[in-house]
Structures are given as C-alpha cells and as structure tokens.
Image (cartoon, grey):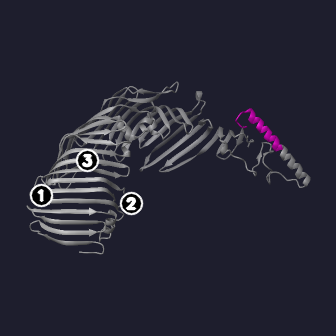
Amino acid sequence: MRTDDAQLAGNAQVRPDAPGGRADLTLSAPGASAVVKGELQPTTGAGTLRASVQDAARLLAWAQKLPGAGDALAGAQARGSATLDGSWRGGWRDPSVQARLHAPSFDWTPPGAAATPLQARGLEATINGRLAQARIAASGRVLQGERQLDLRLTASGGRTTPNASLAASAWRFDLGALRAGVRDPALGEGVWQLASRGAVPLSWSPAQGGQLEVGAGDLTITSSAPTSQAQVAWGPVRWRQGALTTTGRITGLPLQWVERVAGSQLQDAGLTGNIVFNGDWDAALGQQLRVTANLVRASGDITVLTTDAQTGVQSRVAAGLRDARLTLRSEGNALNLNLVWDSERAGTINGQLRTELAAARDDDGNTSWSWPDSAPLQGQVQARLPQIAAWSVLAPPGWRLRGALAADARVAGTRGEPLVSGTVTADDVALRSIVDGVQFEGGRLRARLDGTRLLIDEFTLQGAGEKGSGGRLRATGEAGLVDGRAQARLNATLERLRASIRDDRQVTVSGNVQAALEGRTLSADGRLRVDRALILLPDENRPTLGDDVIVRGPDGKIMYGKEGPGAVARPTSAAGQQAAQQQARSDAARAKADAQARASEAGPLLPTSTCRSTWVRTSACKAWASTRAWPAC
C-alpha cells in the first residue's frame, strides 16, 4: 500500500475464530517509521516491534491530511522525537515482555486556541517481565507553562486473570518508590517534594461496574524556603459500584503553606506565625452518607500587627491562640460545618452552617452525591475581632486598613440564593496609603445585613489631624446583588475633609457626592468645594501662561498678559494707543512686583485666589513652581 509520501509494505495473517496471527510489516511516513515482525497466539508467539518518530512536526502535518483527521487535529502542534523498542516471547495470555519508550524532547499542543503546550524532557519508561508479574519504571520531566513535574516511579505486578481478555482482565500492582518534584506558581516559589514510604498495593477489576482498591500508605510532602514537612497517611481506599470509602490523617500542616499559596497578602495583613495543624477524615459515599472530618490546631501561635490607640505606634504581638478548629459532620443527608477561633488578642469567631446533599442513582444502581443550588442553608456567625491590621487583606495593593469589627449574622435561603441577616459594626477604622497621600482615621460603621443587601446606616471617617482638624466624611447607602448583578448606592457628605496629606499635594474639600454601581457601570455626581489646596510642582512640570492669556484683578485691571479684543474699548488715535500700552506695561510691572513681594513674605506659598465653576468652587488655592510666582487669577 503506497501513497505519494507514505508506504506500508509486508504481509499479515489474522485468525478471528481463535484470536491470534502473524505479521511482517514496515511503515514509512513523513517524519516516522515502524517495523513489526512476529507471531502471537494464545499460548505461543515471539516477535519484535520498533517505532520511531524522527520529526513530530512532519508526522502531524501528514496525519492532518488523512481523511477524517483534519477536523480532529485542527490547531494541534507537535515537535521533537521519540522511539519505542519492544519484544515479546510466549502467547498473549501471559507473554514475557521487554519494552522501552524514550523521548528526549517532545512537545505537544492539543487542538484549541487557548491550549497550553505540554513539554516532555528526558522521558523514559520501561517494562520487563511476564504480563502476570512485570517490573515497571518511569522517569522524566513534564512542563506546561510555568508548571513543572519531575517524576520517578517504580512498580511491580500485572494481570491476575490470565484466561480473560485484556478488556475484561483484573490487575494488581505494588507501587514502590515514588519521588516527585512539583513547581507551580500557584503554590509559591521553590519546588515541592513528594516521597512515598513503602509499597502501596493497588488493584482494579472491571467486574460489576468496576472495583478499585488502594492499600494503606503514607506520603511525605516537603516545601522549600522555608523548609516545612507534613505527613499524609491513609487507610484502605475502596471504590465499588459507585460507592467510595476512605479514611486517613494529615499531621504537621504548617501555616507557612497557606502563606505560600496566598502570596504576601497574609504578611501584608500583619499575620505571621508558626501554627501547625493536624487533620483526619473518615468518609463513606454510597447509598448512605457518612462524613467526619477535622482540622485542629496542634501547636504554635500567630502574631498580629496592632496599633496603639494613643500613640499610633505599631507593634507585633502574639495572638494568644487558645483554640482553632474546623469540623464537618454528616447526619443522614445533612452536613454540619462548625468553625471555632478563640484567642486572647485576635478575637473570637464562632460559626455554624447546615446544608444537605442530594443523592442520585444511575441505570446501573450506582449512587452519586451532589450539592445542588436548591440545597437549603441554615447557620449563624458571631465574630468579635479587636483592633488589628489584618483587614489590609481586603484593601487594594499598597493600602492599609485596620479596625475593630463585630458581626452577628444569620444565614438562610439556598445555595443558589443565600440570604444573610444581622448586624455589622466597626470602630476606630483607619485607611492609609502612603504613596497616594491618603490617611483617614477614627472611622465608625453601623450596618445591617438584609437578605442579599448590606444597608449602611452610618459610616464616618476623619481626616488626618489633631483634635478633629482633618475634617470628616459621613456616608449612608446600600449594596447588594440583584439578579446576580452587583448594585450599590452611596451618599457622602464631606466637611472640610483633608483628602490628601502629601507634602507636595495638600487638599481639603467639602461638599456632597452621590455614587452608584450598576453591574460594571460606576457613576458619580455631586458638588465639591476645594477649601484649601497646596500643590508643589517640580521644575520640569512647571506650567506657564500663554501669550494670549489675560489675568484681571477684582477691579477689572489687567494683572498679567496683553489686552484681548472685546475686553475694553481700543483707543483710535496713535497717541491714545501708545498711552494705553504704556499704562498696561506699568500696571503689569506693578502687579508682578506686588505678587513677588507677597510671595516673598509668605515663603513658598502664593497669594490667595478665587476660582469658580459650575461644579467645583475653590475658595483658597496656593501653588508654587520653581522660583516664579503666579499672579492672582
């Protein structure tokens, strides 16, 4: 059989009545070749197989031209090489097999515009022995984007039903040494190491809808920078006819792992520590539901960043953690989740949530469990959290948020439409961004939870300054979800609020603002008045007035610039024009001298000016740029 660029040559014989046959075939195609020669009968046989991919890109391009393969392989990409060498001796019921797969470099991008390439480096897999008892080994590196897996695995075992077909055969293996290194940005920096201890038996049978059993074993998980280690041990795991049973425990789970996954957010929030957790589980998911799981603090404490109410000095103190646990229990189809957090300086939290799972059976009688949107919810949360800086995790990057929070909430409704009611209060709220020059303090919040809405009855913030000199912001409003879309409304009143405290940008404003959020659309309206502003501009950004700009004083005199048309009547005679020009120059010189004198007396600040518009009114603004003073506008 031959095409323009491929050829299949040789002969083959197949006996359908007694599965078996013989073949002597050679295939050559662009970028690949294969040779198979031998005989395979139920109890006798011998032969060899060799397949080689010299250029995966050429082979894929050829395969995409085959009838029916174009759509299935559209967009796929391949690159690299691989070889497979194998031989067998004996019949297919229990042959002795030797095979080796070697791929020094192979890249594969599956069909799909957003598919990420899979890259194999130094991949090697071998199998040696009879089909009933063989030794298997695999090693290599697999990469996908920034994720990387280095794997080394050994196992032994094989088929336990020699008289059955391959599809109906049962298998048993003992998984030996497992060594894996995992690198994933989602898990933080460095490489995570996984190592098994001892052999783990594994068996599979396709009978009665499938049966999978995994024997007891344990795994050591180690992280780097800093080095931490945890042990995961499990009892026998069984899956039969859709029913799953599993037990196990985890010891030495450190808080640092949460920090690695969460990035720097916990540290930015002022939370660090050496807490170690232990956990255990016992679950059966079949016709009946039985679930018990616990995660409990075993040792250690956390430190929190606190702020002295009198001096504003921040310090790090131990939270004095007494108890921290999360438990999950089942009662029939219901699940109960309980959270306990009890500490001396980081507050207390008590929460309970109850819901239900739904069971469904397929045509084979297998039971599956799910958490539908119609599952009822019932619970409550009570929290008393003191003045700590942990709330910065809720603020944008670079911002710091702190305050004492108290909440008493009740949960109802369903998973698809949860309803929350209760109260939320916060005192001594402070918000700060050094880069943006924003600092508010002395805040207070009084809010109510009503179904899917948060009703803000009172929200106040004070600007930075002694004895309330920084002004105040007062706001009321509401926020919530309506038909799955975020909606919010806020009415704010600013009373001489010090909005910016940077040395080169000091602004005090008053007025009213109404803001609304509808889905992704944010709108704002209102009337603001700039009460005071001090802006220092660097020399390279110093603004200048154009030659066509005329600045007039309160009496209508020209203080800066040339006279513009339509401002005053022009003298018609040459003598009158010359006198007017002389007067304008004299007035401008006098105005400039007065402005410089006032600027010299006031230091780097300029004379007070009044500017008006339909939206913002400036009653006092001062600016300084380089060594040149602007005349009053």
Q: Which label is found at residue 95?
A: 1
Where is residue 221 drawn, in percent x and y?
Answer: 29, 39
Q: Main secondary structure of the magenta part?
A: helix
Using residue 583 as the reference point, say whether residue 282 is left or right of it: left
Alpha carbon of mark 2 to alpha carbon of mark 3: how far?
Answer: 32 Å
Q: Which residues are magenta?
A: 587-607
Q: Secondary structure at mark 1?
A: loop
Instruction: Name the residue tied to disc 3.
Output: 152
Find out whether the residues at labels 1 and 3 contact each other: C-beta distance under 8 Å.
no
Alpha carbon of mark 1 to alpha carbon of mark 3: how far?
Answer: 26 Å
Q: On screen, 17 above or below 529?
A: below
Residue 285 visible to an observer of this rendering: no
Q: Residues within 10 Å of mark 2 (few under 14, many from 20)?
A: few
Q: Residue at x 71, y 33 (%)?
A: 603
The residue lying toward the viewer, choosing from 127 and 582, is 127
Q: Residues within 10 Å of mark 1 (few under 14, many from 20)?
A: many
Alpha carbon of mark 1 to alpha carbon of mark 2: how far?
Answer: 43 Å
* Sooner in the amino-acid sequence: mark 1 or mark 2: 1
Q: Secondary structure at mark 2?
A: loop
Instruction: Name the residue tied to disc 2.
Output: 113
Where is residue 159 drawn, in percent x and y?
Answer: 13, 53
